Amino acid sequence: MPKVQPSHFAFDEASEAQITKILARYPVEKRASGVIPLLYVAQRQMGRDTGSAWVPKVAMDLIAERLGMAPIRVYEVATFYFMFNMKPIGRHHLQLCGTTPCMLRGSDDVMRACHDAGHVKVGETSADGLFTLTEVECLGACVNAPVLQVDDDYFEDLDYDRTVALLEALKRGETPTPGSTIGRQTSAPEGGPLTLVDMDGTGRE
């Protein structure tokens, strides 16, 4: 955990509304099961409040109190999963998949675009505080590789130029449409779906 930590954290009205819905899912004696959802709530509130989505220690302590858990149990969960940030990050968290399908489809070019256009390297935050870049394992969207997760959204079928365009849009404060950057329909083949048009089930068109 970073040495610089806020001295206070309180859930705001929007977070409290989410927490009420989350805790209603669990019996009182099992409310500790809500630790992961509440960590998400805290991280997203920090993102709204500070522009940096991370989970400070005071937020974890508050979660422990709300759930009747020892604080160390919350720390263990938060530090185990990569989706929780234990230190401040940039306004946008760029998570680039570098595993085999994405690598074969050009994730190195996406990485280069992040370096060139985002002015950020893996494990670091850009000087302007806009981007933090992390290389991650499989994001589970291999059919539309290469994939870059920006905050909670997936951007798929990227190449160098499309990644640069994405980052430039984020710099301008725009909200790019997530999904395939080549107009692919969900996970259909490039060029559109290939389906039979027969209606009698014979396989003949």
Image: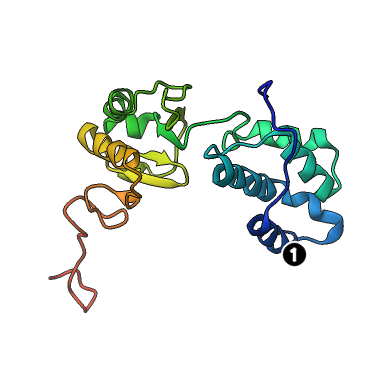
Q: In this orientation, which residue lies closer to the viewer: 196 or 80?
A: 80
* Residue 72 falls left or right of residue 166: right
Where residue 194 appears, x then y in whole percent? 20, 60
User: What colouring style does the render use?
Assistant: rainbow
Residue marked by disc 1: 24
The amino acid at mark 1 is: Ala
Decide: few, some or many residues near mark 1? Use Cα within 10 Å; few <14, some 14-19, many ≥20: few
* Residue at 25% from the left image edge and 34% from the top image edge: 164
Which quarter of the picture shows residue 49?
Answer: top right
Where residue 125 appears, x then y in whole percent? 46, 25
Looking at the image, residue 91 lies above or below residue 113: below
Where residue 72 appears, x then y in whole percent? 81, 32
> Which corner quadrant holds the C terminus?
bottom left
Q: What element carries label 1?
A: loop
* Residue 126 falls left or right of residue 88: left
* Residue at 27% from the left image edge and 36% from the top image edge: 163
> Which corner quadrant holds the N terminus?
top right
* Residue at 65% from the left image edge and 37% from the top image edge: 55
Which quarter of the picture shows residue 115?
Answer: top left
Which quarter of the picture shows residue 88?
Answer: top right
* Residue at 72% from the left image edge and 40% from the top image edge: 59
Looking at the image, residue 165 lies above or below residue 2: below
* Residue 128 falls left or right of residue 46: left
Q: In this orientation, which residue lies closer to the viewer: 171 or 195?
A: 171
Q: Which residue lies furthest to the left in this view?
A: 205
Q: In this orientation, which residue lies closer to the viewer: 97 or 62?
A: 62
Where residue 52 appears, x then y in whole percent? 54, 37
* Residue 71 falls left or right of residue 195: right
